[in-house]
Amino acid sequence: MSKSKVYFTDMRTTFQENLPQKLRRLIDAAGLGTLDFNKKYVAIKIHFGEPGNLAYLRPQYARVLVDYIKERGGRPFLTDCNTLYVGGRSNGLDHLDSAFDNGYQPSITHCNAIIADGIKGLDEASIPLDCPIVKEAKIGRALADADIVISLTHAKGHEQAGFGGALKNLGMGGGSRAGKYEMHSSGKPEVDQRLCIGCGMCAKYCAQSAITIQNKKATVSQSLCAGCGRCIGVCPRNAIHSTFNESEAMLNKKIAEYAYAVVKDKPHFHVSLAIDISPYCDCHAENDAPIVPNVGMFASFDPVAIDAASADAINRQPINPGTLLSEMKHDHDNYFADVFPNTVWHVQVEHGQAIGLGSMDYELVKI
């Protein structure tokens, strides 16, 4: 079996070619133009960025894809699904406001933004799967209605998945609110009372009112908890963690299966930008310092291969001083596990390969 091709270019520019032009050359070399876009609805799955976060992808990168697709007769739109946790993207109206505030306006991107699962996160489609875990994935209706799916991903760390790449963008990002609940529900967090200082940040960000503060200590109600893991990321003392170690592995497997559901029976293409590589997801209302230098831009028809290639490239970079990664112990060449020791990001790509979504065996083609 031949290796999947992943095309790559660094972030260097010349007086003759800027970064948007270089991205266009990359996607063209990777074969995006071979897809039949004529009169097709094309979903560009992207993360618009939580308000306050500045690590999300600039909208000008999306415009490159939009213009390329429109020139070939396609009808592109930018899309994402609502979040489980409270914040600027938990309903369709706030989500669009957040997207516009972060620059994702038609005047800049040259297309409209659509929140895939609607105003309340209830507009979903059930996609039957023959997968080991998920038998019927609940994804945003707009993604299900699209003829072609393209992921435009900010490659970075993630406090639960370990690594946030194309599979995470498609799988977790493509799930409706009910779908996100299904992906998160195999493990629910608990509080290490020795570390908790009772600051209340976890309770503030809990959409299910599952966390209470008593005697300056937080407690999670297992019956109310949705298992979204937002409290894990906002805790300033790392006092909250998943109840079971295997929950991280299960989450990554479900993410891979949901990613499969989003692209099932459709042409799909993937672009990942490994820049501003923050340790946390862009779902945070802040972004920590990038843990390594900017790597570059990747493009492929294979979402598993592009994740394997971008993660490998990130792990080969020198560590930026004064960052979260620089403060952690380094026992192996796995920066994502160094930052969040309980995570098992590789399970995501391994499971993606196992279910036939793509291949971890890739050929890196540099342009």
Image (cartoon, helix red, strand yellow):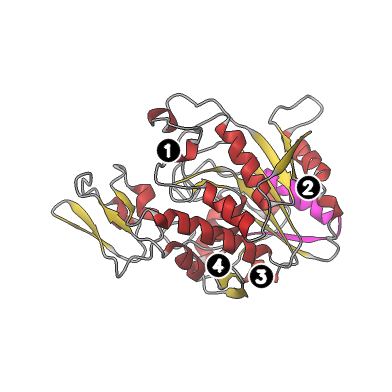
Could you tell me residue 151's position as x and y percent? 67, 53
Q: Amino acid at mark 4?
A: Pro
Residue range (magenta): 58-79
The amino acid type of the residue labelled 1 equals Val
The Cα atoms of the two marked residues, 3 and 4, are separated by 21 Å
Q: Is residue 18 left or right of residue 243?
A: right
Q: Quadrant of residue 141?
A: bottom right
At horizontal 57% and vertical 48% (from top left) the residue drawn is 102
| Residue located 60% across and 31% down the image | 294
Report the residue marked by disc 3: 144
Amino acid type, mark 3: Ala
Classify mark 2: helix, strand or loop.
loop
Q: Amino acid at mark 2?
A: Ser
- Which label's residue is closer to the chain start, 3 or 1? 3
User: Residue 121: x percent and y percent?
Assistant: 51, 70
Residue 2: image tag: 2
Q: Nearer the viewer, mark 2 or mark 1?
A: 2
Element under label 1?
helix
Say above or below: 98 vs 133. above
**Which is closer to the viewer, label 3 or label 1?**
1
